[in-house]
Amino acid sequence: MTVSKSFIAGLPKVELHVHHVGSVSQRVVAELASRHPGTVPSDPAELARFFVFDDLSHFIRNYLAVVDLIKTGDDVRFITYEVAADMAAQHIRYAELTVTPYISINDELPAEAFLEAIEDARQAAHRDHGLELRWIFDIPADFGIPAAELTASVALDHDVPGLIGFGLGGSDLGYPRSMFRDQFDRARAAGLRSVPHAGETTGPQSVWDALTSLGAERIEHGIAAARDQNLLGHLVEHRIALDVCLTSNVALRVVSDLDHHPIRELVAAGVTVTINTDDPPMFGTDLNNEYAIAARLLELDMRGVADLALAAVDASFASSLSKVALRAAISSYAAMPPP
Ligand code: ADE
Ligand code: ZN
């Protein structure tokens, strides 16, 4: 069973697990690298090699080198708008974009200027492309409690339009999710939804930790849950979705290849799985490609692929009004696929 690329490309989609700087196209990274010569290559072939990773920690090092290329408010405005335009070109209508203020703000680019730049781009994306962007501010675990405190303060001490979630990214190995309970408690008390990474390079315990210590309402990755029947049952019972990124897990050598990805076991257990990209240009993918891979692995027809898009709408933190509109757009497209 194959679903055509054109059906997937035209399907209205939402994306729930995708990182801000990790979504900057290779073309834009190369342009920034030629403006600021350093560790990131501007030559396309060399840049493609720079985006081949041994593991998550190698990825984080290179990711941070790309972050260093984004120096001014105008750079932030530009990359954020370009990311949104790339999303809109794939018929992504709504996205929860994970932003990591701790690594992006500094003395030259203070929180206020950073927040103003992402808000300008968010509004422009809606005006020009009809894309609804929402933010998840995440703690980069590798930088510890100081980063967690700063992330909480940027999220909670400013008025941030579009901010809906609080996350935790970076390494999971060596950083028990419970370390960040205090910051998550405060973010949740302020109404932010809890969406930590867990169970990416670690085992099921980190997913349990995210649920019990951080009140996770969705889990970014969470694929280690496939190894724990009780955890699978818990995710099903409490309707906790896993925001899965198939190509990312291969690129960071979390799984050996796509055919060994546990997505089938997760779906067979009844867990809600959403399809996402994580850091698309860094892993040589995009959301349409991820849907095509999921369709192959899960042996889906067009209806099944549309159901994946609907599951992501249900799992999202979009307003009820937006959910109604997104569901209607998906359902009407799926009933009338283009020739
Ligand atoms: N930040 C960007 N991509 C990430 C990933 N795959 N895991 C953890 N943190 C990330
Ligand atoms: Zn991620």
Image (cartoon, rainbow, N blue to C red):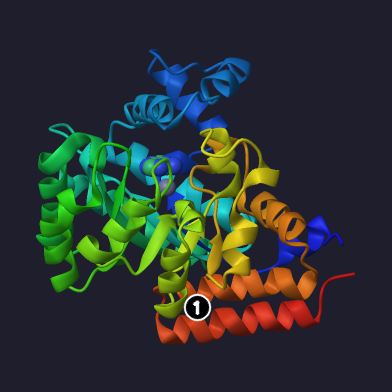
Residue under label 1: 314
- Ligand 1: quadrant of the figure: top left
Disc 1 within 8 angstroms of ligand 2 (CB) = no
Q: Quadrant of the N terminus?
A: bottom right
Would you say residue 109 is visible in this rendering?
A: no
- Left or right of 121 in this view: 284: right
Give x and y (percent) for residue 108. 17, 32
Give x and y (percent) for residue 238. 39, 78
Identity of the residue drawn at 74% across and 60% down:
295
- Left or right of 102 in this view: 5: right
SS label for mark 1: helix
Give x and y (percent) for residue 323. 49, 81
Instruction: Out of 76 and 233, give the one closest to the viewer.
Output: 233
Residue 87 position by quadrant: bottom right
Q: Quadrant of the C terminus?
A: bottom right
Instruction: Out of 319 and 127, give the one closest to the viewer.
Output: 319
The amino acid beneath tag 1 is Asp
Instruction: Out of 153 and 244, give the one closest to the viewer.
Output: 244
Identity of the residue drawn at 20% across and 61% down:
213
- Left or right of 68 in this view: 307: right
Relative vertical location of residue 338 with respect to residue 1 in this rendering, above or below: below
Would you say residue 103 is visible in this rendering?
A: yes
Task: Report the residue that reaches farthest toward the right.
Answer: 339
Identity of the residue drawn at 50% across and 46% down:
82
Q: How busy is the neighbourhood of tag 1: few (under 14 within 10 Å), some, or many (20 plus)?
A: some
Identity of the residue drawn at 41% across and 65% down:
231
Instruction: Out of 238 and 326, give the one closest to the viewer.
Output: 238
* Count of number-bearing discs: 1
Task: Report the residue that reaches farthest toward the front.
Answer: 229
Give x and y (percent) for residue 260. 65, 44
